[in-house]
Image: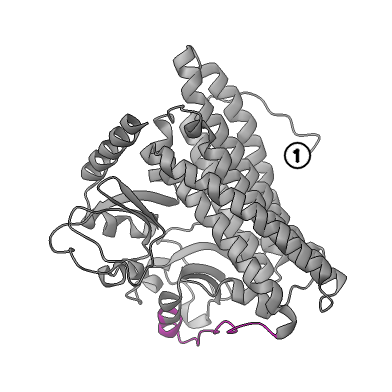
Amino acid sequence: MDEEEEIEYQPVSVKEILMNMKNYSWLMVNLAYSSIIYNDETLASEVLELEKVVDKLDILLNMQAALATRSANDAEKMVSIFRLATATNKISDAAADIAYIVFSKIKIPRDVILSLFETEETITRLIIDKKFNGFELGDLLSRSKYTLDVIAIRRGKQIFLEPTEKFQVREGDALLLRGNVEAIKDFLKQMGIEYEVPVKGASDKYYEILNDLIQLRNTSLVMVDIAYIAMLTKSEELAERINEFENYVDVMLEEFSKKIIASKNLSLDEKYGAMRLAIASEEIADAALLMVQPLLAGLEPHPIIMDVVEETFERISVVEMDEEDDGKTLSELGYSEKGIVVLAVRRNEEWFVMPPYSSFVVRNGDILIVKYTSESESYVDELEKEEDREEIIEDIQEEEWEED
């Protein structure tokens, strides 16, 4: 943080601070990976500026939470808030570490970077053509049947984070889009652009490190999602899964480090860049464990956390399956087209974490834990009204907490 910047107490609610911290850290992770994909120092600079904001918010939260603690019961519930804030700050630090790779002038090969996004969800960049100058963002997005999230728009040196549908684009604007591969391909087709297909497998030189990098990145990000689910549902079982995952990531990082050191195919700079990516992923995994440590200690999450999870840019909620859904696979439900990712399924008292997307068969009464952005909110409302979602979550919380 800049030495000359002084931080004074501000009367801002703990909920608002937590929501901002979660939003910024989520944006930072997306922008950081985008910055190394496109070797974009402007995006990387934005990540570093946001890191300062998150640091300041973390201090403000500590001030506000301290004032709000009036009893032993308050103190117990505040533990979950302090840990969530610390974990969120840790994620923002990891994102900054990723962004620093751009400034180090270490060129991680493009086939390696693109392959990191050879998953169900990907990020791409679109430059606005002059024929779309002045169009509202919502009008452009409505050209596709799929739902996409516009993470940010860069206009010269300006960056607009999470722009609204009313945002008017200009020729030369760079849109950063996030969604599944089919959604990205369809939207670009509607815009008259051919999708740049990620390289299917890196060269032999990088193959030995590629799979490990992908696994480290994906596992750490999934852990954060599951950690939020654990807090939302008060599930100690899911918290214990995070603990197991964190140990697994530690082992992966150790084996990856040995492989990198022993590699005869990579230059020193390439080894350094790959290690920074791997270590940043491990830091995100550590943050996920920090989130759920209060649960593992038998401390109930603060009610504010439920609002934070459901009201930020990237949200987590629930959808209950009915008779019409019974027997369908997750793929057949068609949620992916609407920008909705199924993170877990709760069937009776059993959890299925990150079920196989295309083949998992749902049953009447299953509770799907879903992740989505604000663009998909109306569709989620069609699937399950807000008041019903709240009731489902409360039922799960009661069952999980009673089991503990």
Residue name at image x 50 percent, y 72 percent: 119
Q: Which residue is mark 1?
A: 1
Tally of numbered discs: 1
Front one among 257 and 221: 257
Q: Is residue 384 magenta?
A: no
Residue name at image x 45 percent, y 62 percent: 167
What segment is highlighted magenta in the picture? 186-203
Residue 387 x %, y %: 22, 41
- Indicate the quadrant where residue 109 lies: bottom right
- Indicate the quadrant where residue 279 lies: bottom right
- Left or right of 216: which side holds 299? left
Residue 6, relative to residue 106: is it above or below?
above
Front one among 45 and 82: 82
Residue 160, relative to residue 69: is it above or below?
below
- Left or right of 152: which side holds 332? left
Q: Amino acid at mark 1?
A: Met
